[in-house]
Image (tube, helix red, strand yellow):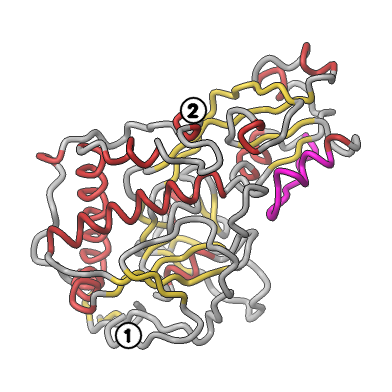
Amino acid sequence: MKFMNPVSGLVVGAALVLAAGNALAGAHGNAKITDLETAPVRTGDWSDEEVARGREQLIRAFDAGWIRFIAARKDLAVLAKYPTNQPGAAKRYIVRLADCLPQPEIAHWPEKPVGMFKDILDTGVIRQLVQGVPETPANTSWYFSGIGAEYQAGVIAEIENHYDVKLTVESVVVRPGRLPITSILNDGKIDFVTQLNATGGNSQGLRRRNSRRFTCTMTASSQFIHIPEDSKLVDEIHDVNDLLARPDIGICAGPLSTQLAQAYMPEHTVRTKFVNDLPACDKDVQNGKLDIIINPLHDLSVAGIDGYVSVPTLMIAGTPLWVATEGIECPSDGDPKTEDECFETDAP
């Protein structure tokens, strides 16, 4: 059986945003949203075995690059610069999730590339998915996207150095909000998803960990409860368990916290602000529409918002890079505005 869904003869359309030798993760500077109908796909005359092996090789190459990046402590140099309004502050809210240790000697580079991984190296083009969230300090993603971009660029540089290639990163930009990202990945419109989705979440009705391949965790952050300092809740909410026991408390969440808040607190009112979430959540709390904010910043003063007490939840969300896996189908209902459900064709 031949696989004809995912990229050889690449044609770069106007809908694609090009970032030569670099990769933006998360937010994408108000770039034009890609027309997915006309975006090219990676198509190869590959057997099922070559498809699976090529995808796994891409994951292992990402991991090999990441492990060498952190072994050289290049990640620390990146953290020292962010966020740009308060250099070094990221070291207080970026968590190192040690699911891949800095041991290059056991992180081997894939040999004899096949399938999509060989095609990426041969064409010198790799395509990523990013989300078109404005890159401003009003968005929580702004405090993470620059770090993720440099981390990812460093990993790709390691791949370039090892395989003696130069890779151009093409960005497929999608709108903010919940999206059929697994469908886009499976359709071959992209080779991987940036640090856009945390490992614990779901996509189109499936656990992300089941519906895609994933790399080492590259960025991670704890989730914090932010309570107005003049609220009586300061004396009542000391940890996440106190919050879980109070479904009467209304929560405002940004896009980096929404699935966690909704899943852990289904009895609470949870409102999500996908764009400009920081001032929008602050406004809703100050005018009494909601009571608290949940997001990954350890202190809202990093974003220029004062008057809150921050309480750690001790819950951590980590983001890897994502690559397609086999045995996942996402039938379309014909409506591009809906997020079609996916299923496993051979579920245990």
Residue 214 in picture, x, y percent from top left: 36, 51
Residue 228 in picture, x, y percent from top left: 79, 25
Q: Residue at x 77, y 31 (%)?
A: 292
Q: Which residue corresponds to mark 1?
A: 10
- The quadrant of the image that shows the N terminus is bottom left
In the figure, 120 relative to 88: above or below?
below
Q: Residue at x 70, y 28 (%)?
A: 226
Three-letter residue code for mark 2: Arg
Q: Is residue 240 left or right of residue 78?
A: right
Q: Is residue 50 visible?
A: no
Q: Is residue 259 visible?
A: yes
Q: Quadrant of residue 325?
A: bottom left
Q: Which residue corresponds to mark 2?
A: 92
- Secondary structure type for disc 2: helix
Which range is magenta? 268-284
Q: Is residue 322 left or right of residue 275?
A: left
- Taking depth in this image into account, of 294 and 267 the one nearest to the observer is 294
Q: Residue at x 67, y 48 (%)?
A: 138
Residue 277 in picture, x, y percent from top left: 70, 47
Q: Is residue 253 left or right of residue 24?
A: right
- Secondary structure type for disc 1: loop
